[in-house]
Amino acid sequence: MVNNSQAIFFILSAVLLFTVMDAAAKHLTQQIGIIPTIWARYVGQVIIVCAIIAPRFSNVVKTNYPKLQATRSVLLMCATSCFFIGISEIGLAEATAIMDINPVLITLGAFLFLGENIGLRRTVGILISLIGAMIIIRPGTSTFTIFALMPLLSAICFAAYSLTTRFIGRNEDPATSLLYTALCGALVYSILVPNYWQQISINSATLICLLAITGTSGHFFLIKAFSLGE
């Protein structure tokens, strides 16, 4: 129970930080575009983590799960890309409401793949949340667009990322997972960003710093939460 209580604290802290990150990303995509925003998010995290772990870099970079760490990194890159594309075209509140289905997917995935208990109440909650997501997306109506699907795809990728994080969390240094979390996105978008780069204003630079700090801190708390509790 103590571990679960700590995990709840960490997950609430992560959600708070991700909320700030999403708001910063919404403004930043409108100022400098989607590709530079995602690049800033990942490269910023790599720089922050490397600066923090520099004295023990050689130990932190060693992982017990190289393939799973690579998979996590790809999944998070896909989740971030889909969500940032979505919020660049639809409202942040609408996108977040759709994205909020990911805890439901995580709960279901933890039952199916990690053997965690689910129970009747959680089962009912999953069904209600799935119905709620369909009400928000409203497929078949004039308000339905491909951009409304982006947060849903993001939720699926983020749920898979979270389940993988939970699986390796008990046997991996959180700093190691935090480092590998951003590597794929940083590498891929560093290749793409030169063709999309725009001049950065002081306001955009401030948002970039905010994006990097909240993204890095949020994922650290998320990793800690999944290493401690269900």
Image (cartoon, rainbow, N blue to C red):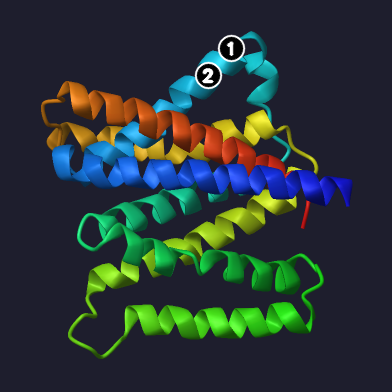
Q: Secondary structure at mark 1?
A: helix
Please give the residue where the numbered disc 1 appears in the rendered image.
54
Q: Disc 1 residue type? A: Ala
User: Who is closer to the viewer here, 172 or 30?
Assistant: 30
| Label pair 1/2, CB-CB below 8 angstroms | yes
Q: Disc 2 residue type? A: Cys
**How many marks do you count on the picture?**
2
Residue at (80, 41) in percent of width and height = 171
Residue at (15, 24) in percent of width and height = 201
Farthest-out residue, right: 1
User: Who is closer to the viewer here, 129 or 154?
Assistant: 129
Give the image quarter of residue 53: top right
Residue at (34, 58) in percent of width and height = 82
Residue 146, which numbered label?
A: none
Is 219 situated left or right of 188 in this image? right
Where 16 falls versus 75 (above or below)? above
Residue at (74, 81) in percent of width and height = 121
What is the x, y in percent for residue 79? 43, 55
What is the x, y in percent for residue 34? 22, 46
Q: Quadrant of the C terminus?
A: bottom right
Q: Secondary structure at mark 2?
A: helix
- Separation (CA) of disc 1 from disc 2: 6 Å
Q: Examine the rendering and report whether any part of residue 174 can be seen.
A: yes
User: Who is closer to the viewer here, 153 or 88?
Assistant: 88
Residue 50, which numbered label?
A: 2
Q: Residues within 10 Å of mark 1 (few under 14, many from 20)?
A: few
